[in-house]
Image (tube, rainbow, N blue to C red):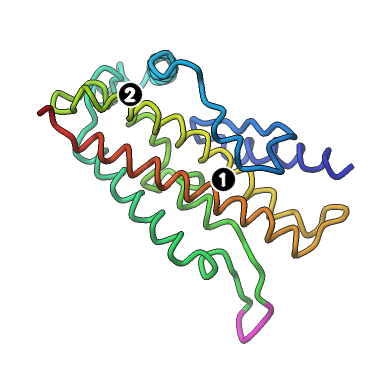
Amino acid sequence: MVNSSIVLLAAMASGATAFSASSVNLPSTVLSSSSAIHAVAPSRRDFFTRTGSVVATTLLTVTSANPAYAADTPPTPEELERIRTGYKNIQYLLANWEAETTVCRENGGECKRNAEAVRKYLGLRSTLDPLFQIEKVFAKVRFMDDIDPDKLDEFFDATEVWNTTMNMSNSMAFISQFAEYNPGGGKDEVKKYLDEAQTQVVLAESALKTILDCVNSSPA
């Protein structure tokens, strides 16, 4: 019953982020270990090509109306700034993890852990969040004239890790919201899933740093 509830909640997490271009895939064996983030696609270049194709198809009607969103154009300075801002925001989240994931009632009321901030900082709550659908910006990076081609493999690796850890962070954060009320649940269960979300956010932050380093690189 507990496993069924967890799988159902993971599916709900995917539905709750319908505005995001990423979908949550949460096998039952993943919940006990963060090592699942290493299960990446076998071919980095194939992955990047497929990602670009999906984004191009999804944005077909938009790009016909606004060339600025075309998948075969490099990211704009504003789009690159979104990556930088998002990275700084994630750094802030990790530096203030307990405060950002705790909500207290007014006038000295009870305080409870709450993972909503995790999803917000990852760009999964609002179209105004800097990292909202940031993978569309990643798909444009290969068209940059001033990126070091020797950095592309590293960039592909980092985008894979970002996608995986972002999805895992989202799922763990969402599940933690209900862990106290699930059969066999409680505050310890809430903390367990929050801790797992934090582990994934740390990995996501590292991947985003690598992406920024590659974007800011220039051929020697």
Q: Amino acid at mark 1?
A: Ser
Q: Amino acid at mark 2?
A: Asp
The overriding secondary structure of the stretch rendered in magenta is loop
Neighbourhood count class around disc 2 (C-alpha, 10 Å): few under 14, some 14–19, many 20 upward: few
Question: Which residue occupies 52% across, 70% down?
Answer: 99
- Residue sitting nearer the eye, 36 or 126: 36
**Range covered by the magenta-colored residues:** 106-110
Residue 67 is left or right of residue 123, and the answer is left
Quadrant of the image containing the C terminus: top left
Magenta run includes residue 209: no
Q: Secondary structure at mark 1?
A: helix
- Image coords of residue 31 (percent x, y): 70, 41
Question: Which residue occupies 61% across, 81% down?
Answer: 106
Per the image, the residue denoted by label 1 is 169
Question: Which residue occupies 76% across, 37% down?
Answer: 7
Per the image, the residue denoted by label 2 is 153
Q: CA distance from mark 2 to mark 1?
A: 24 Å
Q: Of the two numbered discs 2 and 1 on the same chain, state the one appearing first in sequence.
A: 2
- Residue sitting nearer the eye, 112 or 154: 154
Quadrant of the image containing the N terminus: top right
Residue 8 is left or right of residue 152, and the answer is right
- Residue sitting nearer the eye, 167 or 75: 167
Q: Quadrant of residue 3?
A: top right
Neighbourhood count class around disc 1 (C-alpha, 10 Å): few under 14, some 14–19, many 20 upward: many
